[in-house]
Amino acid sequence: MADAPRRQRDLFENPPKYSGITIEAHQQMLELWKELLAEALTGAAATHDAT
């Protein structure tokens, strides 16, 4: 299966279709990323203060 993405497509083969994410899912992902980054930064600050 690892070789499948590297193979050259046939000229008559249809390109793969990728579906995008919905706006709601995009907004939810952004909020989760913000929370993760805030948690990582506060965790890094806490470990920095402890040392």
Image (tube, rainbow, N blue to C red):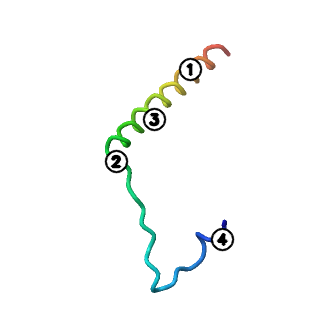
- Residue 2 quadrant: bottom right
- Residue 27 quadrant: top left
User: In the image, residue 12 lies at what x, y percent?
Assistant: 45, 86
Report if the CB atoms under discs 3 and 4 are less than 8 Å apart.
no
Report if the CB atoms under discs 1 and 4 are less than 8 Å apart.
no
- Distance between the alpha carbons at the discs numbered 3 and 4: 32 Å
Q: Say which label, 1 or 4, has the lower sequence index.
A: 4
Q: Which labelled disc corresponds to residue 3? A: 4
Q: Please name the residue that numbered disc 3 is placed on.
A: 33
User: In the image, residue 39 lies at what x, y percent?
Assistant: 52, 24
Q: Say which label, 3 or 4, has the lower sequence index.
A: 4
Quarter of the N terminus within the rendering: bottom right
- Distance between the alpha carbons at the discs numbered 4 and 2: 30 Å
21 horizontally vs 1: left or right: left
Amino acid carrying label 2: it is Thr
Q: Say which label, 2 or 1, has the lower sequence index.
A: 2
Q: Please name the residue that numbered disc 2 is placed on.
A: 22
Amino acid carrying label 3: it is Trp
- Distance between the alpha carbons at the discs numbered 3 and 2: 16 Å
> Circle 2 — which element?
loop
Amino acid carrying label 4: it is Asp
Q: Label 4 neighbourhood size at 10 Å, few (<14), some (14-19), many (20+)?
A: few
| Closest to the observer, 11 or 48 | 11
24 horizontally vs 13: left or right: left
Q: Please name the residue that numbered disc 1 is placed on.
A: 45
> Circle 3 — which element?
helix
